[in-house]
Amino acid sequence: MKSLSLAESSTAGSSNTKKVGGPTLPIKEMIVRFLKGKDCLLQLRLEIDPKLQAKSVREDERQKTDFWMSDHRFLKQCVNPFASTLQHLCIVDYGQQSIMRKSSIMSILSVTCNRLKTLDLRNMFIDMSDCHRMTSLTSLTWRCVKVNGAALRNVKDSMTNLSTLALLGVFGAEGGNLTFQHMTVLCLGLSTPAEDLVMNLPTLKKLQLKMQCPKNLVIIAPVLRYVAFNLEVPESSKVELKCIDAVPKSTSSHTVTESHINYSGQVEGAGLEELLYGAASFIPMSSLVEKNPNLKKVFLDIPCMTLAEDGRFLAPLKDVPLSLPSFDHLHNLRKLEVLNIGPGLWYSLEAKVDTLISVEKWPVINTLYLHMIPHNREASLKVLGLLLGTSVTSLKIFIHSSSPVSRDELATGIEEQVSACELRSGNIIICKVLSWTKSLDFSCFSF
């Protein structure tokens, strides 16, 4: 057997048991018995059903070990039969309440599973202080976990061959001065701000920053190509993204003092190719765009829309200021092929449409993607008319199914806007988005 996935979906509580041939057994004991003898297993996934994860455990039950998949006794019993062959492991524990119990899972895995290549851990309190070297590990994902303060430094010391590191909703990390020689993909999603975080990543190509901003963040990545910037930078913080070529003469530096963003990068040659930017302030974006004239794809948004768990639109966030990017900065992007506008920015464009009218010259845009939760029909159509007055040759519009203004209400006006420009009808697609949570599910219509 090479791969096995187990999902627990019974009712939460100390009576979390199953009947196996008559006697009543705790679910974890049943799992251990099932895994016994699977001595050639390469991949294992243990996941608590999402509905069960959402249930809270009573206060008087929380100290019992029969709930937690990250309990050290259970882990040793689980992985021992196939520790010498296991290469891929994913464990999703009982919801966010699981972060109240500290687990030595990394110490156990680092000793017993020396061939482990990918590790995905969710909903845990992970203690990294006694983690041994894991030189085979190339991919690490932590999602909704609490860690000890030195966890990132522990990761650097024990996992020297990581190529992918995804930290999504990680609490407690204090930062450090970190170097990863082989890392190509990094997602930093720290939910508590670190003091100082300096990362030297000579092979990094893809970077996502979606977190509480550290007081001092420095990322040195000379071959960086793709950046997702979802970071609000307070006045007390400083962020530096350094894409520096080996030849000093070909580099330049620019500082945006208003937001304490420093960006050093090449003006010619290599540089960012794709930028996904989502923040209330567009000042850092201006610096990123100015120093990367070879950008081919740009996605701009403001994180101000709230959605329910099922993907339904709820309301705009009132405490997020609405702003507009300086479209003048896009003029220098001579290779720009695709511009994406997210639903938060579209909402801001609607609200500030009178300001947009004063824009004298729009950048050259070939393909335009609009992700909308329209609130005002007239304002939406006016904004669309301004954007279509550029060099757009292909247009795709995604309209959320629970928007205040429906797709059907906009369709006629969009047809009129299209007929007034040189866009061929075959290059226009309007999609009604049914959900924006786990995946995009489209019901598409073409004119």
Image (cartoon, helix red, strand yellow):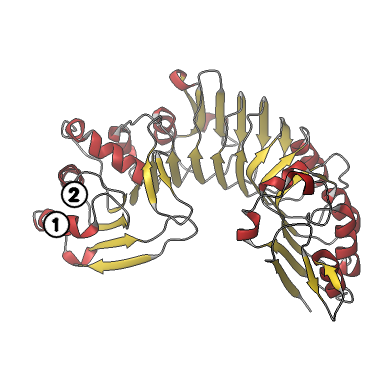
Residue toward you, 2 or 146? 146
Secondary structure of the residue carrying numbered label 2: helix
Residue toward you, 374 or 315? 315
Read off the residue under disc 1: 418
| Residues under numbered marks 1 and 2 in contact, where contact means CB atoms less than 8 Å apart | yes
Residue at image position (74%, 44%) is 59
Q: Would residue 387 be found to the left or right of residue 143 on screen?
A: left
Marker disc for residue 388: 2
Q: Quadrant of residue 4?
A: bottom right
Name the spot of residue 258 as percent of width and height, x first.
Answer: 44, 18
Q: Would residue 153 be found to the left or right of residue 275 on screen?
A: right
Q: Would residue 303 be found to the left or right of residue 105 on screen?
A: left
Q: Quadrant of residue 157?
A: top right
Name the spot of residue 113 as percent of width and height, x first.
Answer: 86, 60
Taking the image as drawn, is residue 181 in sight?
no
Image: 177 above or below 386 = above
Residue toward you, 177 or 278? 278
Name the spot of residue 337 as percent of width and height, x first.
Answer: 33, 52
Quadrant of image for the C terminus: bottom left
Circle 1 packing at 10 Å, graded few (<14), some (14-19), many (20+), is: many
Residue at the extreme bottom of the image, as rendered: 21
Marker disc for residue 237: none
Residue at image position (75%, 41%) is 100
Name the spot of residue 46 as percent of width and height, x first.
Answer: 73, 64
Taking the image as drawn, is residue 106 in sight?
yes
Residue toward you, 164 or 53? 53
Of the residues shown, which amino acid type is indicated by label 2? Leu
Of the residues shown, which amino acid type is indicated by label 1? Val
Secondary structure of the residue carrying numbered label 1: helix
Q: Would residue 223 be found to the left or right of residue 136 on screen?
A: left
Circle 2 packing at 10 Å, graded few (<14), some (14-19), many (20+), is: many
Image: 63 above or below 352 = below
